[in-house]
């Protein structure tokens, strides 16, 4: 074999080797391209997949807060406007029953005092009366107070019954934990996550247009118009969860869970405070509730770490159930097809 033949043979072997290397590398390049393509598609969809930040209410939605004396002296000394059915009933009872009775009795007693001072003074009665009994007067001053107490008792007992009505089974359960000195809100029916709420400092409150010593960094977000099973618990000492404009107050006691039903009528921001002396910073653990429509409440829950919505869980379960049913049908059809030749 001459040198030319050897060279040609060498070139042929080298060409075959390069071709083999190319064939082996081609599937890997194609696979790499297939792997890159989904990444590029994912990146193109990324901006749409990002969940938008939840937009909280601004100061224009504040509805439940104290009224400064400078703005309205009378309103600063009476009850706040009410935004629950119990609050409306209680305010009606106060304005339509208690206040008229108190005013009438006060003026009547004042009249009796002035009349006795003027009519039975020593100068007008040099000889004092020795009358010790008067059956009519004794009957009157016994019967009339009893009637007044009955008139007051009927709406009072009704209000007590309304305030401690048992929440329905489908009520949304939220647990307010009192700490020294801040609040934590556990959403037990929505994944069990807890929102920690601390008072904002003065500059942050004023910059946000909110009242100082009432504004908080994280509000308790709740739905409007649906029953809420609001539970309270003291993690260290006794606290009290109180929102005047919602006619709601419930003690938070260590080792014991208390609960009441709360139904808020209107969307808005409602402020309250701890109403049980709990230590040095008792006056600096405010409560802020942000009431939203149910759809917006569920949207907020989805933005919380670990937050779940019952409707989403049901929908996912239905999808899984439908998928399992389809798989079962496919398997059954395959079994029937496989068994057909044997028959």
Image (cartoon, rainbow, N blue to C red):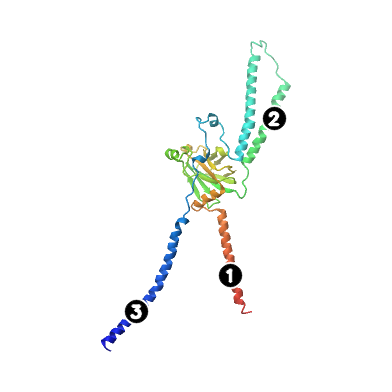
Rendered residue at 55%/53% (across/down): 309
Question: How many angstroms separate mark 2 from mark 3 (CA)?
Answer: 114 Å
In terms of sequence position, does the residue under pointer 3 or pointer 1 come before the other?
3
Residue under numbered circle 3: 17
Mark 2 or mark 3, earlier in chain: 3
> Against 92, is 47 above or below?
below
Q: Which mark is residue 330?
A: 1
- Whole-angstrom CA distance, mark 3 to mark 1, is 48 Å
How crowded pointer 2 is (Cα within 10 Å; few <14, some 14-19, many 20+) is rated as few
Q: Are marks 2 and 1 in contact (CB under 8 Å)?
A: no
Q: Are marks 3 and 1 in contact (CB under 8 Å)?
A: no
Instruction: Give the SS element for disc 3.
Output: helix
Circle 3 or circle 1, nearest the eye: 3
x and y, in percent, of residue 245 in the image: 56, 38
Q: Residue at x 63, y 40 (%)?
A: 162
Residue at coordinates 44% horizontally, 64% vertically from top-left?
38
Residue nearest the viewer, comparing 215 with 256: 215
**Local SS, label 2:** helix
Name the quadrant containing residue 248.
top right
Alpha-carbon span between mark 2 and mark 1: 78 Å
Q: Report which residue position mark 2 lands on.
A: 147
Within 10 Å of disc 1 (Cα), the crowding (few <14, some 14-19, many 20+) is few
Rate crowding at label 3 as few (under 14), some (14 to 19) or many (20 or more) other CA atoms within 10 Å. Answer: few
For the view shown, which residue lies furthest in the bottom direction?
1
Q: Nearer the viewer, residue 136 or 291?
A: 291
Please identify, in this view, whether the residue under mark 2 or under mark 3 is nearer the observer.
Answer: 3
Residue 257 visible at all: no
Residue 23 location, x and y as percent? 39, 76
> What is the quadrant of the N terminus in the image?
bottom left
Question: Is residue 304 toward the left or the right of residue 29 in the image?
Answer: right
Is 14 rendered above or below residue 169?
below
């Amino acid at each position: 074999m001459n040198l030319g033949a050897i060279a040609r043979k060498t070139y042929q072997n080298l060409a075959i080797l390069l071709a083999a290397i190319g064939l082996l590398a081609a599937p890997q390049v194609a696979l790499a391209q297939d792997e890159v393509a989904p990444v590029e598609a994912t990146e193109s969809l990324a901006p749409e997949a990002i969940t938008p930040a939840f937009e909280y209410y601004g100061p224009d939605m504040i509805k439940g807060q104290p009224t400064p004396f400078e703005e309205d002296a009378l309103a600063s000394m009476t009850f706040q406007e009410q935004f629950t059915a119990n609050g409306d009933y209680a305010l009606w009872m106060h304005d339509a029953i208690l206040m008229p009775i108190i005013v009438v009795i006060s003026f009547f007693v004042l009249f009796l005092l002035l009349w006795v001072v003027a009519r039975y003074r020593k100068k007008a009665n040099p000889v004092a009366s020795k009358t010790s009994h008067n059956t009519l007067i004794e009957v009157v001053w016994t019967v009339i107070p009893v009637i007044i107490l009955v008139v007051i008792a009927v709406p009072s007992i009704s209000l007590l019954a309304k305030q401690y009505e048992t929440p329905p089974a489908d009520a949304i359960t939220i647990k307010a934990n009192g700490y020294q000195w801040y609040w934590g809100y556990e959403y037990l029916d929505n994944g069990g996550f807890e929102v920690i709420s601390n008072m904002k400092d003065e500059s942050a409150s004023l910059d946000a247009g909110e009242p100082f010593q009432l504004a908080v960094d994280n509000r308790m977000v709740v739905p409007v118009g649906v029953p809420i099973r609001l539970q309270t618990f003291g993690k260290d000492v006794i606290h009290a969860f109180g929102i005047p404009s919602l006619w709601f107050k419930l003690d938070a006691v260590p080792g014991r869970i208390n609960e009441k039903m709360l139904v808020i009528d209107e969307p808005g921001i409602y402020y309250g405070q701890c109403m049980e002396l709990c230590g040095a910073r008792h006056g600096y653990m405010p409560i802020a509730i942000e009431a939203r429509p149910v759809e917006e409440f569920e949207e907020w829950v989805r933005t919380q770490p670990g937050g779940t919505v019952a409707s989403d869980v049901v929908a996912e379960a239905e999808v899984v159930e439908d998928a399992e049913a389809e798989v079962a049908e496919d398997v059954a059809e395959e079994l029937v097809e496989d068994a057909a030749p044997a028959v």
